[in-house]
Amino acid sequence: MVGSGPGGLAAAVLLAEHGDLRVLVLERHYVAGGLTQTFRRRRHEFEVGVHYVGQVGRPGMALRRIFDGLTDGQLAWSSLGAVHDRVSFDGHEVCFGDDPSRTREALVRFAPTEAAAIDGYLDAVRACVREAPPFLLARAEPRPIDDSRVPFRRFTDPTTTEMLDRLGASPRLAALLAYCSGNYACPPDRSSFAAHAIAAGTYLEGAAYPVGGGSRVAATMARALADRGGAIVIRAGVDAIRVRDGQAVGVRLEDGRELDARLVVSDAGLAATSNLLDAEAPGVGAMREAARTIRPSLAHCALYLGLDRDHAALGLGAANRWDLRVAPADAEAAMAAWLRGDVDRPPYAFVSSPGACDPTWSTRQPDRASVVALFNAPFEPFAAWADGARGRRGPAYEALKARLQAQALAAVLDVAPELEPAIDHVELSTPVSTKTFAGHAHGEVAGLDHTPDRFRYACTPRTAIRGLALAGQDAWLAGVGGAVLGGVAAASYLLRRNLARELLLGRPR
Ligand SMILES: Cc1cc2nc3c(=O)[nH]c(=O)nc-3n(C[C@H](O)[C@H](O)[C@H](O)COP(=O)(O)OP(=O)(O)OC[C@H]3O[C@@H](n4cnc5c(N)ncnc54)[C@H](O)[C@@H]3O)c2cc1C
């Protein structure tokens, strides 16, 4: 297994359990977990890539059953409550929560003359969520099938903007509905409606956060893997996937050692995986071409605030705040203008304090709170420093970072001035940090861009190399749930067995 993100660990647990295999997970970083890792600075704990997850808050929910099976029920979840997203746009605040009829009412209050478009949108989101699993499972079948004409394509082919237009939404309503494009890091005029609908639909019945923090996702799957005889090795970067006669036969580590394996799974993403393969091997050219065609998703900057009072004292609830100063379709260009220094504020911010709903937070972090603000951003302005060592990227990088940090902080304090007196630690990460810590070459938040092309050329664990599968978000969709489903698809493909169905049914082992 190359990489220990949630998708890789999901595949590892299933292969160890159902494949009668000894599974070894090789992780290049010094912590397992990929983007689900958390980190500490002095007295403060911060979350990287887990703020909220849908379909896990109540036992019996689909994704919850899958997580329960992968962690032997050891991963507990805490609900964000009635509201998980508070979206400020065009002078209104609209709440998205765990009751779909209340969410509908909030949308109708925002756009009173557009009830029909809102109902059409919610119906399309539900239908897309319902039809997505069979589409993914068919793509995990051992033999490729031609699915270019299946009915699900009516959701994958149009962009989000095109679909919302067809449903009769005004540009103003369409902009509000696309607020969550930040979650999959692709603007609505580029994203496939299916990617949008699955991301939005996952949260229609609320959201939850792992009890104990995001790092529990990896810790509980690592435990389940160990109980099944598998192991994770950190600081073990894979330099090449070895292939003989079209069959994966093992890997070569960065230190030159070669390991043999009957099966290889890569959680490193389609582009990085294709770069680990010999360019001349059959099918590798097509993998590289697919990754080039789809392109990486947007990257991001994150502002981390460590606060010296607890969440309740600061009035910080678990709901995320989305402050949209421009429509999501215009955010990428507006963000580029901010990075260039043309304007002094980022055009939007996602502000989150997920620890506010974690019942174990105060035992780990008494009298403290943390806030993370995320700003999706293009990678290019940071590309010059992509290969520089951490802490030694030079004065121009440090100056850019200092400006962005000060302006991002000002933007957060514009919406939450009450935080200022409690700030004890401030830090900004850039897309270069994502490259360093998660191995994403372009700092991408969501792997491959969530465009219609992604559903044509990716969104499958299958590769041209026998015995090699892709796990993680590129095998399906971004998000902890999407990556885990990508891992389930990888194990299903290699073992020729519908493991998603077995996990959903909770079949005894
Ligand atoms: C800022 C941010 C916020 C997010 N918030 C949420 C959220 O609230 N909810 C949600 O559901 N999702 C969220 N996500 C998305 C979610 O974290 C990811 O979609 C998911 O973790 C991806 O999992 P993965 O298994 O595909 O790979 P990753 O987590 O990217 O892990 C891949 C692993 O492979 C390793 N690797 C790569 N190459 C090699 C190699 N050659 N050798 C060895 N190891 C290698 C990497 O070091 C890494 O550990 C967020 C993401 C970001 C960036």
Image (tube, helix red, strand yellow):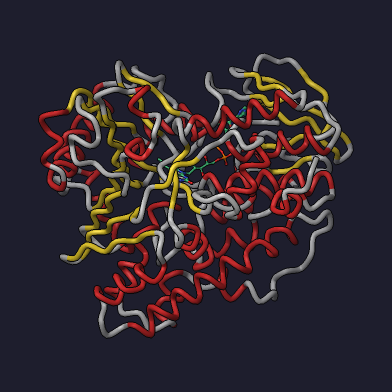
List the single residue furthest toward the right.
245
Identify the image quadrant of the N terminus: top right
Quadrant of the rendered image containing residue 152: bottom right
Most foreground residue, 355 or 156: 355
Quadrant of the rendered image containing residue 305: top left
Q: Is residue 282 at all visible to an observer of this figure? A: no
Q: Compared to 453, does 157 lie above or below?
A: below
Total label count?
0
Most foreground residue, 433 or 119: 119
Q: Compared to 260, does 339 lie above or below?
A: below
Identify the image quadrant of the C terminus: top right
Q: Compared to 375, does 138 lie above or below?
A: below
Give the residue at x 22% y 59%: 88
In the image, is 69 to the left or to the right of 86?
right
x and y percent of residue 163 in the render? 46, 76
In the image, is 135 to the left or to the right of 198?
right
In the image, is 246 to the left or to the right of 187?
right
Give the residue at x 27% y 50%: 321
x and y percent of residue 177 in the render? 35, 67
x and y percent of residue 59 in the render? 57, 49
Give the residue at x 57% y 54%: 61
x and y percent of residue 63 in the render? 59, 51
In the image, is 261 to the left or to the right of 179?
right
Quadrant of the rendered image containing residue 97: bottom left
Q: Is residue 224 at all visible to an observer of this figure? A: yes
